[in-house]
Image (cartoon, rainbow, N blue to C red):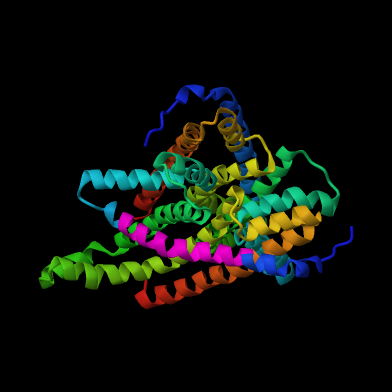
Amino acid sequence: MALDFSIILRFQDALVLGLWMTIKLTLICIVLGCTLGFVVGLARTSRNVLVRAVSSIYVEFFRGTPVLIQLFWIFFCLPLILGVELSNLASGVIALTLYMGAITSETFRASLKSVGPEQRDACVALGLPNRVQITNVILPQAVLRAIPTLLSNCVSLFKESALVSAVGMADLMFVGQNISNNTARPVEVLTVVALIYFAIAFPLTRAVTLVEGRILKKLAI
Amino acid sequence: MNYTFDFQSITFGPLWEGLIVTLELTTAANIIGIVGGFLLALLIMSPVAVVRMPFMLFVEFFRCTPAIVQIVWFFYCVPMLFNVFLGSMTMGILALGFNLMAFNAEAYRAAIQAVPREQIDAGIALGLNPLQRILYIVLPTAFRASIPVLLTNGIVIFQQSALVAIVAVQDLMYQGKTLATETYRPIETFTVVALIYFAVSFPVTQIVGYLERRRQLLMS
């Protein structure tokens, strides 16, 4: 069969709009999700049993079910339960933020744990108050160690964001599928869509490796 | 909120059938992923760049594009490009299997690189040929080290398998969607479907956690 990639140029604008939607969604959810993840990460190490239980259930549930069903649930069920109309973008943001919050909370938790108990002992020996221990000793190291994993969490989120096309949000995947259905040229259109995703995610994964090496060197471990 | 729940209208028959399909997909994809992933790992570690490059591209491509794009691509493009027409189930297995292969190959690679150099030297000293060294020294150690990651990847594929519902494979997600439209009970249906997915993947993640903890104890 003859491939004709020039078809892409005709739909350039639509694809750019779709890509913009994907990027916008990803960026919003990265900011909100990381914040949520940090809070949940702390909550999971809390001394209060109730706080710990609720945050653990949230994380385990969102990590233990497909993102697709989370999206469907939030798109179709949340408006019914809350009794309010949610816009497409709002539902997408809620769903992906909750997903991102769950995966980043694990990252934060692991990195908080990785700061050795000796450091805390040293803080106590130096007579530092609790607040200083956390903000000046534990937190900087924990955040530094979390960065590479957080970056790969962001890449995961970017990839998972393509799922919103299944609930009718006009992101890159949705636009691509529409074009390919209307022009009956799936090979060209879908390949280009895949390549666009690749062109963004691949450099990011390389960056993860680079940053990881740098940080490991800095921490000398 | 004035919504009355009605779990009565959920029929478990189709959901059960869907779960079986989902589990079949997961198992088949995992077999492809575990076996194929190891071969792929050996290929991407090949010292010959010409051999290594295409397979590295394959791995990076599957790791850096959304699974949903891969699945839709498989269903629309493979029949057109290669003129092969396979059943939707086979296509789903292949798409998920290739995806898992790429992720597992990376897991194996990390585990193989973590096999201490001295062990391989010892193999050379004992006069084992390269194949024997791979089979008797590298493979058992690397495989054991990569089990937690392989299990995690396997459970990720179990979750990703919900995506084949989009291309009309009648898995758990698809049956759930149909049931939700038929009964007009999306909340109850999607909640039950989510709980079924959770009930399968949660125990496995707990096992992975246990294996990892035990490993760390053994290592220290």
Q: Quadrant of residue A187?
A: bottom right
Q: Residue A2: percent from the left, percent from the top?
A: 89, 61
**In-front residue for pair A62/A17:** A17
**Residue A22 forms part of the magenta stretch:** yes
* Location of the C terminus of chain B (image quadrant): bottom left
Left or right of A20? Residue A190 is right
Q: Residue B110: percent from the left, percent from the top?
A: 53, 60
Q: Quadrant of residue B66?
A: bottom right
Q: Looking at this rendering, what residue extends furthest in the right direction?
A: A1
| Residue B216 in sight | yes
Left or right of A199? Residue A131 is left
* Location of the N terminus of chain B (image quadrant): top left
Residue B66, compared with residue A129, is above or below; it is above
Q: Which residues are magenta?
A: A18-41
Identify which residue is drawn at 50% across, 70% down.
Answer: A208
Q: Residue A91: percent from the left, percent from the top?
A: 48, 51
Q: Residue B128: percent from the left, percent from the top?
A: 62, 57
Q: Main secondary structure of the magenta part?
A: helix
Q: How many marks?
A: 0
Left or right of B187? Residue B100 is right
**Residue B104 forms part of the magenta stretch:** no
**In-front residue for pair B31/B137:** B31
Identify which residue is drawn at 40% across, 55% down.
Answer: A101
